[in-house]
Amino acid sequence: MRIIGCGNRDRGDDGAGILVAERLRSLGVEADIRSGEGLELLEAWRGIEDCIVVDAVSTGAPAGTIRTWEAHDLSQFPSASLSTHGFGVAEAIRLAIVLGCLPRRLRIYGIEGGRFDPGVDPTPEVSRAIEQVAGEIARVAGGTQR
Amino acid sequence: MTGRTIRVDTLARVEGEGELFIKMAGDRVADVKLRIYEPPRLFEAFLRGRHFSEAPDITARICGICPIAYQMSAAHAIERALGIRVDPAVRLLRRLFYSGEWIESHTLHIYMLHAPDFLGYPDAIAMARDHRAVVERALRLKKIGNHIVTLLGGREIHPISTAVGGFYKTPARSQLRELSEDLKWALDASLETVRWTCTLDFPDFEQDYEFVALRHPDEYPFNEGRLVSNRGLDIDAAEYEDHFIESHVKHSNALHSVVRGRGSYLVGPLARFSLNSDKLPEVARQAARDARLHPPVKNPFRGIEVRAVELVFACAEALRIIEAYEPPGVPRVEAPGRASVGQAITEAPRGILYHRYALSEKGLILAAKIVAPTSQNLKRIEDDLREYAAHLVAWPLDDATWKCEQAVRNYDPCISCATHFLKLNIQRS
């Protein structure tokens, strides 16, 4: 299993995925840290059977709301990428489906962000969500990484 | 009289946030505005009061696509201020580092951002359904570029190894040798890229550009050379601000730049190739000849082919450096701060990147000036559109809008860098 945390830690709640990955590492669980740039993600999960991606999302829900999607569902979503490169997680999934390189199972944990300003700390709601998501993933990953 | 507006509220497949507005009055283009609404970046102000050694790390944060360009211009400018001369092996490693960034950036633009325009797809994902092998080639090429950058930079984005005076850490010979098989594949793939881009259809559209690029006596330019143009410019980086003027325009958060007394100019692949094609290695020159690309290339839509030729160059250069590599005797030359000013220009994937630093005697940055390639091209993009939109008068609005977006993407604009960018808007009245 591969766990990938994405985001930008210098943009407030956008760092949520990275902070989850760091928390997992502190719990002894291997986790990759990525910017969320789509092509990089495609390579990061190529050949992996089971993958979890954690990223901040902006859906209009209250900050700290945790949502999970199976990648095959996400492909039905319109692109909602916040990436300045215009090619983020959602595009990476759609392209991986076209290219036939989507992991057999790819789960997305989305943590709703409240603020994305440069240089600010994550909101308390997101900090709590980070802890919760890290705990859940650690339990899921517990047996599979050894 | 009939008229219309081409309006793109959020330009896609460009880096950053901007909008394009074109107002047509009958068959005349009344107004073109490339409005950059990405917020100002203020990096020049962040740098004030920081130690010179921090400049490469701080400026790398300006861009996730071309952080190495920022690091290179920053390091060279400060080295010039302090009179530092780097070890020859460091100089080669910097060229290798830049090759990695060009491979990543050019591959992304050619295949994922620009090719869908020529082939009639809304995006690279739709293109991949019909051109799977092409997209797979792009992914592998980009990965190889990433690998170079990661190996030299310590990590893929915002590398941390570049220091004023050299590198904090340099790779062992064996680490670079590991790249050579991949790079041999990449060189073949880059040649295939040139052949593939040649099969695209290009609009019949040429402009009389002032091309501005670095020129080095022996090399296709990355880090060094005089700044030259096809209209007689031939200056040292220290003279840049005497010849180029930046000004604020109301509709944009990015500054516009002009050559003093002449107006807009063009930087980037077309300019570099048009001024330096004789310095390309034979493999890239031959690829250009096979593609019937002869300098000067005045059709901005053919930028995709020129980028492909530069991709050949970057792969060949990386291979050359790896095969001859010996680790530097002095990885980093240190020097004390002194009251001084230094300027440098390097060739970022999108064109020349100018940095100037004024330092205090303790080595603190008193003033910094950064002029990114996209901000230098903005006025030129508007000038292209003013001419090009006039060709599209009879076109259905949706098609005209798409062609105008494509004309903007010719420049691979990096709006995040330029603001200190894209929506499209064609108004017919």
Image (cartoon, rainbow, N blue to C red):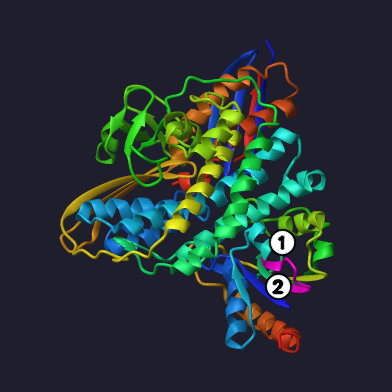
Q: Most extreme residue toward the top, as rendered?
A: B1
Do the residues under discs 1 and 2 have CB atoms within 8 angstroms? yes
x and y percent of residue B326 in the render? 38, 63
x and y percent of residue B396 in the render? 75, 23
**Would you say residue A91 sits in the magenta stretch?**
no
Q: Residue at x 70, y 73 (%)?
A: A65
- Viewed as shown, does residue B48 lie left or right of B257? left
Placement of B337 over or under A20, stated as above or below: above
Placement of A117 over or under B226, stated as above or below: below
Residue type, label 2:
Thr
**Would you say residue A48 sits in the magenta stretch?**
yes
**Observer-nearest of B370 and B139:** B139
Find the magenta span and give its range. Answer: A44-52
Q: Residue at x 68, y 69 (%)?
A: A62
In terms of image quadrants, where is residue A103? bottom right
**Observer-nearest of A112 and B321:** B321
In terms of image quadrants, where is residue B117? top right
Q: Dot 2, how many residues are within 10 Å of its Cα: few (below 14), some (14-19), or many (20+)?
A: some
Report the chain holding disc 1: A
First reached walking from the N terminus: tag 1 or tag 2: 1
Q: Is residue B11 visible?
A: no
Residue to which mark 2 is pinned: A65
Q: CA distance from mark 1 to mark 2?
A: 10 Å
